[in-house]
Amino acid sequence: MIKLSNIKKDYVTDGVVTSVLHGISFEIKEGEFVAIMGPSGSGKSTIMNILGLLDIPTSGTYTLDGKDVSTLSDDEQARIRAQKIGFVFQSFNLLPRTTVLRNVMMPLIYNKKNRLSNKEREDKTKQALNSAGFPEDRWENLSNHLSGGQIQRVAIARALVNDPVLILADEPTGNLDSKTSDIVLKTLQDLNQKEGRTIILITHEHDIAAYAQRTIFIRDGLIAEK
């Protein structure tokens, strides 16, 4: 499903070129749960941004779901990002004074290509919340009345609601305690094992990466081990 071929990334600031990725190549099959792990400054966040179509490589090719997406226009990348990629961030990014249902439904509302009725949107939202293991009796709660673990489950449900081919989880437990982290990571495991979701987990911690099926180690902009 995912193939990176000799991906390089340079940033230019005031005429100074900083090379971050020096030729990254790997493949991830449909239905895999893979961790990309490395210390701060290793390049893993840059890889995540490229995988999520939030940044483009300086050179090399990125194939997603059979299509080379590395040379598409901004509008084309935005469309694929909305349709095929679900994001789970460390910072949650939920609307604070909005219900759980409404927060999860937002991607369906803003996806103009998705001509769904209100009933269809609501059904897909409830399905996503059930997949993320979020209790039904809290669906009408405001998101700023939830615990950190509950908020992250809402964020996972929101990532699922458009039925993406790929879920990118960027340090999803960074703001959570160890017990809550375990619940969130087991939720991702269940999505992979029970629903066959393809998941990429970005982390700098070995115990977090251990929840994935395999780990790609990044150091100094190169793959150290995979």
Image (cartoon, grey):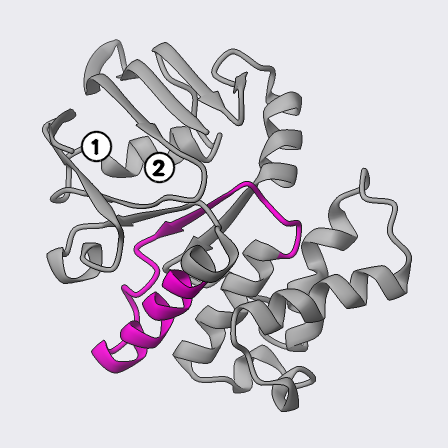
Please indicate whether residue 49 sits to the left or right of residue 122 in the image. Answer: left
Q: Amino acid at mark 2?
A: Met
Indicate the position of residue 27 as horizontal and vertical percent values: 32, 26
Q: Residue at x 32, y 14 (%)?
A: 5
> Which quarter of the rendering shows the C terminus?
top left
> How far, Cα to Cα, is label 2 from label 1?
9 Å
Q: Position of residue 56 (x, y in %)?
A: 43, 20
Residue for badge 2: 48
Q: Is residue 98 visible?
A: no
Q: In the image, residue 110 lies at what x, y percent?
A: 75, 48
Q: Are marks 2 and 1 in contact (CB under 8 Å)?
A: no
Q: Which residues are magenta?
A: 161-190
Where 207 falls versus 199 (above or below)? below
Q: Position of residue 224 (x, y in %)?
A: 8, 30
Nearest the viewer among 169 and 49 is 169
Which residue is drawn at the image coordinates 61% and 71% (left, top)?
129
Magenta-span inclusion, residue 3: no
Q: Is tag 2's residue or tag 1's residue first in the polypeptide sequence?
A: 1
- Which residue, given by chain and number where applicable, does mark 1 sit on? 43
Residue 109: quarter of image = bottom right
Left or right placement of residue 159 versus residue 54 in this view: right
The reply to whether the magenta stretch includes residue 169 is yes
The kind of residue tagged 1 is: Gly
Q: Is residue 71 visible?
A: yes
Sort mark 2 into few (<14), some (14-19) or many (20+) by Cα contacts within 10 Å. some
Q: Is residue 220 left or right of residue 65?
A: left
In this view, 74 is above or below 178:
above
